[in-house]
Amino acid sequence: MRPIWKEDPSPAYQAIKALILGGFALVIVVPILVVISTSLASDKDIIDAGGYVLWPSHPTFKAYQTLFSGGLMGRAILVSVFVTIVGTAIALAVTIALAYATSRPVLFGRPVLLMVLFTLLFAPGIIPMFLVVKQLGLLDSLWSLILPGALGAFNFVVLRTFFMNVPGELLESARIDGASDFTILRRIIMPLSKAVIAVVGLFYAVGFWNAFFNALLYLNDTSKWPVQVILRTYVLQGKSLSADQLGVHPPPQPQSLQMAVVVVALVPIAMVYPFLQRHFTKGVITGAVKG
Amino acid sequence: MLKRTSSVAQVKNGLPLKAKWRRDWQMVLLMIPGVVFLLVFFYLPVIGNVVAFQDFQPFLGIMHSEWNGLQNFVNLYANPDFWDALRNTLLLAAVQLLLFFPVPIGLALIVDSLVSNRFRRWFQTIAYLPHFLSWVLVVTLFQQSLGGAGFVNNLLRQAGLDPIPFMTNPDTFPLLVVAQLIWKDAGWAMIIFLAALTTVDVSLYEAAAADGAGRWRRLWHITLPSLRTVIVLLLILRIGDILSVGFEQFILQRDSVGPGAAEVLDTFTYYAGVVGGDWSSGAAAGLAKGVVGALLLWGANSLAHRLGEPGIFQRRT
């Protein structure tokens, strides 16, 4: 409903607004659609269209079959899934515990909080991080992709802000009934903050899935490469996939294969996005405004 | 049963340490994993920055490498590649700040003025999505769209025109970078402004309209002032992060545009140190960047306090 004091919009204003927003949306959607369409296009579609296909007239999953019959992509997906799941689980456990413990006025709470907030101000730098990971013997281990990202200051602030708003009386009464701090965390705090925890978990998961530079820095062993590094090497840098990486002769058009790699990196994000979108606004705003 | 009160006085000097420990030991236990993580993956590397003051040799390690004072920084000062990287960083940061920062504010104002809720939700759903895509994916999508063999240039060729080297021209690289940033994050950055706009008191608009203020005067005198705090906050965060400019974005495109345009402080650190084996120069550049970044953040925050804004690090009263 238009409030009564608002002028009726002139058609010119309306048109300009629609043009800006529609154009912005189009620029986002079209490249993604072209990539998906091309990955599903048959060889004939691609040759007819001279490269990219807006709408595949003979859709086929051949590119995906080829991609998955070789060892390369399957392994990369396993690596990425492992890093994402294990990383998210560890990161959530560490962050929840720390956020809860610092959300109440307890022994060492204040200095530990300052320890976390300082990480927002200063970054240690690439070289010292590399040296530490190397000293710990984590080079060429998947743990090098997981452990350095196990505590995000932003996610910590979001969770802590939420935990602080759980009324203290609720926790006191549980304590009087004999509940320990562990029990309170498990039986009261966590059930109350399911939605926020889910959003923070998804933020972590998206971060682990998307991480690229860590893998470039810490992994020399190509058999441990996650999906993002595969995407960079075989699509962005245009290195061609060899026959034994594909396992099918003759392989389909390289164009549709490359686009299939892009789609593989995109699909998990597209799958969690509807859930994320429903809940993140709240999380972001509590974190940013009250943090 | 000891009660945990949130009264500052009592926490500070209420109970003896032993009683607090007996009350809080489980909480302290819960902090341990996080603290260990911070010590190992944050504070240890922070201390590791001492290699910036050493002639660091990997086979000798930090303990046995020789100290050489400020020699690495003197070398950096004489290194033209470092100055290139610094100049690129500052140029790209300035372009990003000028061209990117206003975009989400503008988008938020337009979206906020929409009356149709359906159109608004539909636009938000599309606009937020790219934020969750990795930089590899974003750069790949740009390459497939605007690259030499991308579909835009395909269309140009089919229309008999010359292809445009969007992705490889070092002169227009800053614009390309900003375009990518807008594509990826402008929609996402809009959220916070939209949230701030919903807190504006509608009766202000109503009163202003009754007094004869048109849409532009309402925008200037009501809407923008109420966004001021959020704008300042985000500007500070942006300035603190300015020297990072978006590391993955540059490392992914350094090959195609060349280091002349795409080398920034972070990529310089990586290529000089990890790739080139000159660990100490890399670490010196990284440390210089970290310190300047922290100072910028601090300075911007103090300035905001001076101007009467809350900023990000609240001053304790």
Image (cartoon, coloured by chain):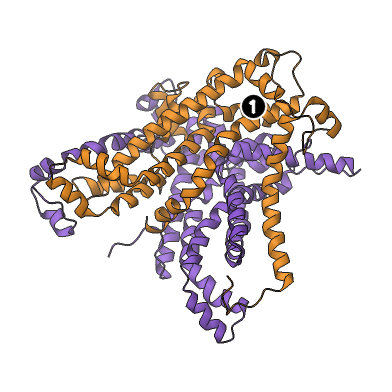
**Number of dots carrying numbers:** 1
Residue at coordinates 70% horizontally, 49% vertically from top-left? A27
Residue B35's x, y, as percent? Answer: 29, 37
Instruction: Give the colour of chain B.
Output: purple
Q: Is B186 placed left or right of A79 in the picture? A: right
User: Which residue is situated farthest in the bottom direction here?
Assistant: B211
Check the image and report above or below for B237 versus A276: below
Front-most of B232 and B261? B232
Residue A131 seen from this side: no
Tell me the quarter of the picture where residue A233 sits: top right
Q: Which chain is orange?
A: A
Check the image and report above or below for A264 versus B305: above
The residue that disc 1 covers is A233
Q: Is B156 placed left or right of B204 in the picture? A: right
Residue B33's x, y, as percent? Answer: 29, 34
Which residue type does callout 1 highlight? Thr
